[in-house]
Image (cartoon, grey):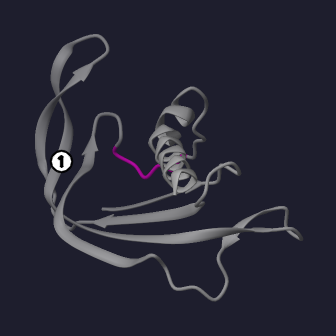
Amino acid sequence: GRWELSGRCTDKNGKNQFEAEIIAVTDEPGVLLRAPTKDKGMQYACRDSGFGSVTMSLWLLEWDNELGDFVRARGQVPLVDQARSSQCTVEVGGIPWNETWNVSSKMKQPMKGMVRLPYVVRGLVEKTRRSKK
């Protein structure tokens, strides 16, 4: 199986906007595991493999006035360029997910604010330290 995930942190109030890409792959069939189901409790309904490989890349983003959107920073190498690990667990199947599927989502408030909170706090701490110098 192959999993491709990507996401962006594009909060205009934040100091650093970035884009992350994660790709996980395995050729292993995995093992059948119990998983919670809606009506029948814990059932053999999930197939996972602990023999996945994962690659991650991270790019800084910059605002492009012409496009009206964030783009990967021009002329800069990725912050993380295809970091790799062979220690990855992936879900390779289950009920009723026997076919390929694609999904997109956007993080909404309040979760978006909670994920961003550590970066906001760090920025405030740094600003306070600079003002005391």
Q: Which residue is mark 1?
A: 48
Q: Which residues are magenta?
A: 98-103
Name the residue at 57% across, 38% down.
107
Name the residue at 54% across, 63% down.
19
| Residue nearest the observer in this picture, 7 or 104 | 7
Q: Is residue 21 above or below residue 30?
A: below
Q: Is residue 105 above or below residue 59?
A: above
Q: Residue 67 appears at what percent x and percent y?
A: 85, 67
Q: Residue 127 appears at what percent x and percent y?
A: 56, 51
| Residue nearest the observer in this picture, 71 or 120 | 120
Quarter location, residue 63: bottom right
Quarter location, residue 45: top left
Name the residue at 23% across, 66% down.
26
- Asked if the magenta segment contains residue 27, the reply would be no
Residue count near mark 1 (Cα–Cα under 10 Å), binned few <14, some 14–19, many ≥20: some
Residue lying farthest to the front in this orientation: 133
